[in-house]
Amino acid sequence: MENYAANKTIISEGTDNTIFYIIADGSVTAAVSSHDILLKKGDIVGIFDITSPVHSCSYTAHEDCTLVPYSFHNAEELLAILDNNTDLRKLIIFSFCRNIVILIRDTQTLYKEAVELYQYVLTISEEYQTTCKSIGLPGKTLPFMEDLMPVKTEDAPPFFLEEYYSSMCKIISEADRTVPTHFVYGFLNKSREDVGHMLHICEKLLDSEKNYIHALLNEDYLDIFDLYCDLFFRTRSNGANADTVDASIRSIIERLKKIQLIDKSLLVKRVSRFQTKAVSVREKKELSKEEETIRNELNDSVNYILDYAGLDSETISEFKKYLEQFKQFPDKNATGRGIDSIRKQLTRLYYIIYAAVLKKALDAADIPIIIKMFLNFGYMDASLCGNDNAFTLYGIASSFHGLRDQGIYTTLEWFKEIYCGNKQPGRNEFEQDYTAYVRTLKREHKIDNQQEAEMLTDNSAKVIYELENMFPQGNKITFGRVLTFCPILIEENILKPLEELILTPQKILASFDKIKSIDYSAFYHEIIFEDLNMNIKETIRVDIRPDIILTPNAGVKGVLWQECEGMHRTTPGRMLISALHMENSEKTFIRMTGEFRWEMCKRTMGARWNDFASHSLTSDYCSYVQFFSKNRDLSYDAKEKLREMLKHCKNSYKEMFVQDYLAFIQYESSGSCRLNKVSRGILFLYCPFPNEICRKLQSNGAFLECLNKHNIHKGQQIHRLNQIILKYRNSGNPVPDEISAQQELLDC
């Protein structure tokens, strides 16, 4: 007998399955796919995965309880236990059937809730656009709405399953004869697939419901609730009646209160913020002379920018024509042949104007604020941007800058770095850097030797190369909505106050500090240290954080453009992210760091990056994904999740890794299990946590195996380094700084 106090963990999810218990007294909570099932006296603790290699759920004492343990190490030992206990065989099947029925019913309820919530999100979104049209204000569109998928009918439990197990429960409880051992084991083994299927469905339904809730209300203020609040204040500021919008907001609040998974504290915070702001809104105050002057200046922004560019009258006339046509569309993020064609023409002309303005600005001692707004944010027209937004952006642009010594650059600053020869242009779509591109031109006899030499030292040509390659592609990718991309800043794409959107160096550095506090080796580059006199050749790691380039748009994505500069591993990589970033920037930087880890490993390993015989992060992860169906360390439920995830990631191993890395940093680092045993092991090996986090995870059984392997691996590295240090000391030579630095890194 074993006694457990209330709330004491009995079995942790992800741990090896070598024991089950009969509840002799008290009750136990089985945490099954984020919801709980109460196991009572006579039930089996471990029932849902009794024939699985690992536990797919955790079990915690609901109250003080007494348990009877049964230990085993393999299927043969489990069969022996069943063979020697006639009553246990019947009890196990009865317990299994009774509790899987509860699981099936919970899944049916979850399915119904998810379907209803999706329909509500669609309805309230359509009502928002209708309300905007009736009021005469432009409607805004959330960037992720097009990715919001409905619940599929196959995500409902099979119609016969509940009745099947209810009947089996009744048959077993009323049976007079003993139940054969192999029947029990076979039944449990086959039925485990149903448990795995139910857990998989539950996980998908919960993920769907969380996505719908996220669309309604989230911490980033990028949600339907905020769209309505924004509409309320825009309506008020225009002097129109906002009662209809106010009624819709109250209706949304009441609906949110009924959702069980909603973060109640977040809801209270958001409602309170809206109510406080609604009370404080007053009549529009008179403009100061300074503000009036600035607003008048902004009203002529297009002409100001075009005059600064100094382009020919034909280009200017063509641009103005398409700009006026674009303004006529009530929904500027709509799709269709007419508006798509106009956006395409505007984009083409925009980059011609951008190149002309940039060329002049690079040589200017003092750049006008409106030109900075154009170059750093894509601003062109006050009416398109919104007059209030334009005025706010004017104040931001006057002091907006990067931080060169930390590798953070605005778009204008980045082009200046290239123009001054401090940085080289990025790679083009064929993965060619500028030098390789020039040599290709020479090889194809498009330029001669003299022209090649001139181009390699011509910084103006390098700027043009960057303008034609990295800039338009990076701007479009970071914007995030490819189908409706237009580089001109418009009000419909500004979904939050600009002061909250602006990505400052302080925000960026805070995100990097957070990532490094969890994954301290995130930006390590491997290089070879060689000392011929001491006959030492060692791979060492140096910490080189990527350069950050803030692209001129209001976007939702970040992208790792390249993991290092050119062919040199000791140069910083490049990450692009919107200067006005609407998503959670910390999450975006975690994703880009995951991309960096993958690409840097590929660069280091070369052709062996996916060779299973050469152990590395990419090769081990590719092996894991490619052969997961044969992996005995994965439960049926874990395999189903992997199939679904691989499909969702369009069979991209890299995207799967980035998703796992995101979960590893955000959740696993705090002890919240989101990964399966195999994936966790790979990430723990190649992206280890610092000592402080490792100590906190020691009490979590799901991490014990990872921690043991990590300690062995780290001990081997320390031992090897100590041998090198001892060799230097014995020879009377000072220990090189590079070796001492490695010792400090291993102490993290």
Image: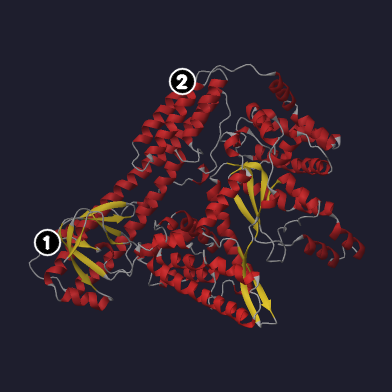
Asked whether the residues under the numbered discs 1 and 2 touch, taking CB atoms below 8 Å apart as contact, a structural biologist would say no
Label 2 neighbour load within 10 Å: few <14, some 14-19, many 20+? few
Residue 178, picture quadrant: bottom left
Q: Is residue 299 left or right of residue 176?
A: right
Residue 254: quadrant of the picture? top left
Residue 630 visible, this angle: yes
Rendered residue at 24%/71% (across/down): 186
Residue 690: percent from left, percent from top: 49, 62
Using the image, determine if residue 282 lies above or below residue 606. Answer: above
Amino acid found under the numbered disc labelled 1:
Ser
* Percent position of residue 289, x then y: 71, 18
Structural distance between the alpha carbons of marks 1 and 2: 62 Å
Observer-nearest of 458 and 314? 458
Q: Which residue is mark 2?
A: 243
Residue 393 pos. (x, y %): 66, 33
Position of residue 270 relative to residue 7, above or below, is above
Q: Residue at horizontal 42%, vertical 24%?
A: 247
The amino acid type, in three-letter code, at marker 2 is Asp
- Would you name the residue on which mark 1 appears? 173
